Amino acid sequence: MGKFKLDEVDHQILDMLIDNTRVPFTDVAKKLLVSAGTVHVRVKKMEEAGIIEGSSLTLNYQKLGYSFIAYVGLFLQNTSQTKFVLERLNQIPYVTVAHITTGKFNIFCKIRAKSTTHAKEIIFMIDDIEGVYRTETMISLEESINDKKRLMHTIFNEL
Amino acid sequence: MGKFKLDEVDHQILDMLIDNTRVPFTDVAKKLLVSAGTVHVRVKKMEEAGIIEGSSLTLNYQKLGYSFIAYVGLFLQNTSQTKFVLERLNQIPYVTVAHITTGKFNIFCKIRAKSTTHAKEIIFMIDDIEGVYRTETMISLEESINDKKRLMHTIFNEL
Amino acid sequence: MGKFKLDEVDHQILDMLIDNTRVPFTDVAKKLLVSAGTVHVRVKKMEEAGIIEGSSLTLNYQKLGYSFIAYVGLFLQNTSQTKFVLERLNQIPYVTVAHITTGKFNIFCKIRAKSTTHAKEIIFMIDDIEGVYRTETMISLEESINDKKRLMHTIFNEL
Amino acid sequence: MGKFKLDEVDHQILDMLIDNTRVPFTDVAKKLLVSAGTVHVRVKKMEEAGIIEGSSLTLNYQKLGYSFIAYVGLFLQNTSQTKFVLERLNQIPYVTVAHITTGKFNIFCKIRAKSTTHAKEIIFMIDDIEGVYRTETMISLEESINDKKRLMHTIFNEL
Amino acid sequence: MGKFKLDEVDHQILDMLIDNTRVPFTDVAKKLLVSAGTVHVRVKKMEEAGIIEGSSLTLNYQKLGYSFIAYVGLFLQNTSQTKFVLERLNQIPYVTVAHITTGKFNIFCKIRAKSTTHAKEIIFMIDDIEGVYRTETMISLEESINDKKRLMHTIFNEL
Amino acid sequence: MGKFKLDEVDHQILDMLIDNTRVPFTDVAKKLLVSAGTVHVRVKKMEEAGIIEGSSLTLNYQKLGYSFIAYVGLFLQNTSQTKFVLERLNQIPYVTVAHITTGKFNIFCKIRAKSTTHAKEIIFMIDDIEGVYRTETMISLEESINDKKRLMHTIFNEL
Amino acid sequence: MGKFKLDEVDHQILDMLIDNTRVPFTDVAKKLLVSAGTVHVRVKKMEEAGIIEGSSLTLNYQKLGYSFIAYVGLFLQNTSQTKFVLERLNQIPYVTVAHITTGKFNIFCKIRAKSTTHAKEIIFMIDDIEGVYRTETMISLEESINDKKRLMHTIFNEL
Amino acid sequence: MGKFKLDEVDHQILDMLIDNTRVPFTDVAKKLLVSAGTVHVRVKKMEEAGIIEGSSLTLNYQKLGYSFIAYVGLFLQNTSQTKFVLERLNQIPYVTVAHITTGKFNIFCKIRAKSTTHAKEIIFMIDDIEGVYRTETMISLEESINDKKRLMHTIFNEL
């Protein structure tokens, strides 16, 4: 597969950007004792290799009125409908994650809603997608961990 | 609860930063026809209000060798152990998400691993936490959607 | 939402009426050291605000020959039929409670019957509603608690 | 068992009181073309026979801030603990109904809470009762029917 | 319902016949110190009242080559088909017991077969009945108790 | 294993006795055109071979006040307790059948009770047996088939 | 059924061939103190009797790139389709084992795949077979035992 | 990982040996137009690389009296006991396959037995292993496919 090789410098750059994507490259350069140009080139290369896909804000959904999280498992009438159903799920912005899974469900997704009533509406939208024959919902009482940074640091320490 | 009110300008700032957190504030200002200082002040205020909690890189885990995703449901011996178990889960970097849930499981979490064998080791780590009495695993065959940006845009359009 | 505010007097009035809805307002007034008119006005206001929806007798169903209680979970063919099915359930007087639920069932209801045979007939009525594709029944061996008064007192003590 | 026999007049009295427990006995008497004394005597007799156990207000829980309803199934370590667990459940005012049931669960109960977080606290209280070894929760997305009056009318029409 | 009353003599007669239906009535009479005519009359009366429905041999199925016992749960497409499916089950002689049940299954039955292969054929016959949409089988590894005599003695001692 | 061979005459004798165990041997003999002595000898031989284990009355349990039937599945703490638990079940006369089974349950049994309350008491007796760690109950709404005679006739026609 | 009888010599021959099918018959003969012709004749007879069906290499699937093993349970729309579905499964080389089973599933099979993605494709092939209405997958994290030789030795020691 | 590369000749050798492990190397050589020495060297290399682990007879278990196949799922008290339990399973020759699995079970294994009674004994042996807290059994009614040769041919055609 020709995996892109990250060296020690790449690793340190990512390590800094993970915690704050807005840190200026000159600060990164100073800290790592390399030139700002090097930082720029390295980041560019990692973007081109598809390792860095972008950046995103971490917002507080509760403060934005979206305190309700649920996992919804979908049973399809036939797995040949999987692709179509995923396209339709993709049009529901409240569905933030969706996986094709083994076990009980064909598709398993995560939704964020404003309230119980709003959640009901979203679940009904999903139930109404052609090819979805039944759904099962599991409600989150508390999102206790949502943090990919620990994983990223582990990955970079391993490489 | 005294919810912080976002106005049209806040909304437009967030809308731009969501897609690229590194866009310079001067570019944001130019686009929105406000001063760079205004952008700076608004972002600061939203950070202080806890609406913006930070920023994060979107990395491609497959290219980093972490192509295996699973959901693990935990049954605890007693829910009084919930807090303790969550602290221990928090020490396993491969656990990226964990929820206290209703329904079948006490805690439901998401893990990322390098391979089936690696997943087995992580599941065993979880099983070995004191107070965890059984786990059930559901494996992802494909991560089809993982995108909070659609939700964010929807939220800002609603406000 | 502009929630209606109950003050200490409202609270004490409700506290008395909960235990006996037929207590004369003059008795309530005497006890609370207010005028009967005040009691009358307050009750009226709480009725208009929709907080008091009505009153009901607590009857002993066993003595009336209805000793059989069961919970019935309904799976629908499609959640778009939910409203229609609820209307049909509403025509079966033996269904005293019905909820749209998360988890295994689409609708979950409570029935009261005279006997096992009567319960069978009611379950068959439910099964025959168009759009109901399967039901699952859980039978009560003893109704050990059925008391909303403790909750009401707690609510009024909190306010 | 010597079941108490209700006659046509009892039936008509109950039929009126069911819809409004506060209707004056003189109004009932006038409508049924009997004396107020007769109404009084009949109600007294039905109370003494235990058929009328009391009366209760129908309050709007949503307006009182209790919009969250869930059903919680309890698995006990041993059914010899049933009585003890029910006594403990009876001390949690948010538990409004509890049944000893056949099937999956030993005890099945209904709770009312203010929010997801409050529900979590109540479920944890239940989980912490000695002898409770696991619980499973099903959340109501909408209370569509909660009406015993239809049943009561049916009962009185049958007698 | 006008339940038929059994007296002490009836009870003693049944107690003897339960253990051996072929015991001559004269022997029963001698043991109970009544006339043979009395025994005859009592048995007749219990037959006419429908309490004694008949008598049956207890055969050893293993010795007759039927060592395989299984319980089969049926899910119907619609409970309106229950009566029809039971008629069809009644035409399969290997189905010795069938119940309409609460819980998971619509109908639950017991089958006796000669071997695993024979059991497969019987299960396929059941699956092929119109209206049966799925079956689930639980196989007996040992029939440890099959004895109604203990119950009968208990019943007669209670009366 | 040296299976006992039944011939045509044995078969015809059993065929008659199955429907009425009290039919006199002289009647059987007349019908089959053999001597009464032959019938006697054949029955004796089948008893000695253990094929005929005895005879039993078919009673109407409903008329005797036992209208409630349930199936109870037992989970044991350890299968080494199977024998002990079966001995204890054997002391509860309301347990008429018990099997060691594959699948979900360790032991699966059938009970007959007088009422819902009586069933609850019996289930509690079972739950209290040492080594029983949980039970699950499925209630019969109607015993639609309970007939081994069809099977017996089939067996004798096959031989 | 006229079961073929294996004697001590057959047993010893099988015992040697089980561990290495390529061992020359002269070596087997020398070890067992019989002639090579005898070994030849015995093996031939066991092949003709259908006891020896053939021989097969034991390959290391991991080294061949097939490290992914899963068990897939199939629910059919109707068991009359069983034979057809098995024929179709037989055309998918990644399905190495398939059984008609009791319990939850109609057919239960084992698959070997190159990766999670490959497994997804195979599961989709199975889901697409006409008559298959749903599948459930259980993934192997480690194949810990796969050895029929212990069983064979036990069988030959018993005979 | 430095995967061993199989070339066209290796592939053709394996393709012949899969169907009959006892075919002489001279026959293989003649068919492939190479020298017998080449065949010998290639097989040796594949054995040393661990690709060929050995060879095995395909016996007919039914003819050997082992017609009963079941799958047994094990729940462990704690996954730290996995290794110990697998060692103990390995001492029961009737367990021919065992996997550590995701989903419902900790360990999933396949057994072969002589009869229902024998299966019961084997299941009890498994249940008695320290650390095994419950088992669930699924019985095979027919082994419809058991054939790795199709897979092997596919593998070699792909390489």
Image: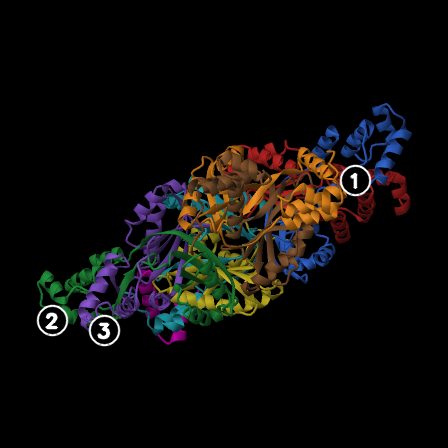
Chain colours: A red, B blue, C orange, D brown, E purple, F green, G cyan, H yellow
Magenta-drawn stretch, dominant element (helix, strand or loop): helix
Residue D77 horizontal/vertical position (percent): 57, 63
Q: CA distance from mark 2 to mark 3?
A: 16 Å
User: Magenta stretch containing residue G30, yes or no?
Assistant: yes
Whether G57 is drawn above or below B18: the answer is below
Q: CA distance from mark 3 to mark 1?
A: 86 Å
Q: Chain of mark 2?
A: F
Q: Quadrant of the C terminus of chain G?
A: bottom left
How many numbered discs? 3
Q: CA distance from mark 2 to mark 1?
A: 97 Å
Residue F112 in sight: yes
User: Magenta stretch containing residue E136, yes or no?
Assistant: no
Please, what is the three-letter code of the amino acid marked with disc 2? Answer: Gly
Please, what is the three-letter code of the amino acid marked with disc 1? Answer: Met
Q: Secondary structure at mark 2?
A: helix
**Do the residues at discs 2 and 3 belong to one chain?**
yes
The residue to which callout 2 is attached is F37
> Mark 3 or mark 2, which is nearer the start of the sequence?
2
Please, what is the three-letter code of the amino acid marked with disc 3? Answer: Glu
The residue to which callout 3 is attached is F48
Residue F88 horizontal/vertical position (percent): 44, 71
Residue H22 in sight: no
Q: Secondary structure at mark 3?
A: helix
Q: Secondary structure at mark 1?
A: loop
Q: Which residues are magenta?
A: G22-50
The residue to which callout 1 is attached is B1
Q: Is residue H116 left or right of residue F28?
A: right
Q: Are marks 2 and 3 in contact (CB under 8 Å)?
A: no
